[in-house]
Amino acid sequence: MYSMTGYGQAETEIQGRIYRVEIRSVNAKYNDISLRLPQSFRTKEMDIRKRLQARLRRGKIQLTLTEEIAPDTARLQLNEGVLESYRKKLQGLYPEADINHLLPALLRLPDIWQTPEEDIETLWAAVEPLIERAVTALNDYRLSEGEAVFRDLEKHLAAIRGCLAQIEKSDPERMQKIRARLHKLTADIIDRADPARLELELLLFADKLDINEEKQRLRHHLEYFEQTMRNDHPEKGKKLNFIAQEMGREINTIGSKANDAGIQKCVVEMKEALEKIKEQTANIL
């Protein structure tokens, strides 16, 4: 089980520059990817998107690729044209400022420095594995988070099963009380009413209070939910959420039909556990 929340990072030094990749992801209904790339790698945006879509599948994902000047810049050349362009823009914006004071900051900008006859494809071949490392780190993080979610879901499923067991234990006594009440209410009118019609009405009324089918369906949904949790398919969050909705329908129906204070208390506890399950399924891949 994978969570949609995670973080991955990787960095390396290439040709006198430090390249760092950071990937963050949070829950989302679909695959929503945003990229922040240096100008030199803008042509690789579609390649990066396809890689992230294939590896990360779902979630709101932000990848940032940065490049910084390494402490040892002996292999780099100063791009005087770019430096002069920055200087003129700053001078135009702040005529009264002493641009010389900003020179150290300008010299740290990646575009100021260049490697002789820099080949983007060769550079990309060195940076591409860095992205793969960051994606792997993110997936490892997601798996670790998913294992914690798995344990939490097991706890809440056990709580619902415990409440369902209490309901099943107390349900026969509830039905006996209902039958006794019905016999008492009908004792005074049985001589005046049509026996066949009265029997039919009593059967219909008793059927409205019977919760055996709802209990059976809820047990089935609990088993199906756990089977889905444990299967090997990496994407299961949406399916688990749909099953949780079906569980909610059965729990609500039990609550509306039971007409019993003890069972109503169990229903409230099951609803509380189910809400926590829904919160968790929203963050599962």
Image: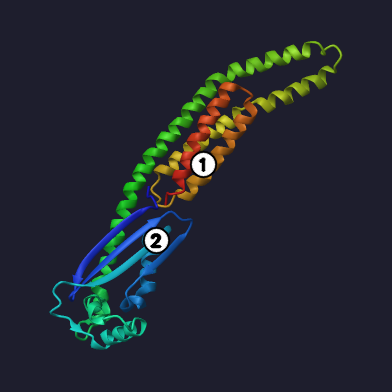
The numbered disc on residue 60 is none
Could you tell whether 194 is left or right of 230 in the image?
right
Q: Earlier in the sequence, mark 2 or mark 1?
A: 2
Sort mark 2 into few (<14), some (14-19) or many (20+) by Cα contacts within 10 Å: many
Q: Position of residue 69 (x, y in %)?
A: 21, 74
Could you tell me which residue is drawn at 82 percent across and 22 percent down? 197
Q: Position of residue 159 (x, y in %)?
A: 45, 30
Could you tell me which residue is drawn at 62 percent across and 33 percent down? 253
* Image-quadrant location for residue 218: top right
Could you tell me which residue is drawn at 40 percent across and 34 percent down? 155
Decide which of 284, 91 is in the foreground and name it: 91
Asked whether the residues under the numbered discs 2 and 1 touch, taking CB atoms below 8 Å apart as contact, a structural biologist would say no
Find numbered disc 1 in the image and state the secondary structure of the residue it sits on.
helix
Find numbered disc 2 in the image and state the secondary structure of the residue it sits on.
strand
Amino acid at the residue labelled 1: Ala
The numbered disc on residue 61 is 2
Whether 124 is drawn above or below 232: the answer is: below
Could you tell me which residue is drawn at 73 percent across and 23 percent down? 203
* Image-quadrant location for residue 11: bottom left
Q: Which residue is mark 1?
A: 244
Q: Position of residue 210 (x, y in %)?
A: 64, 26
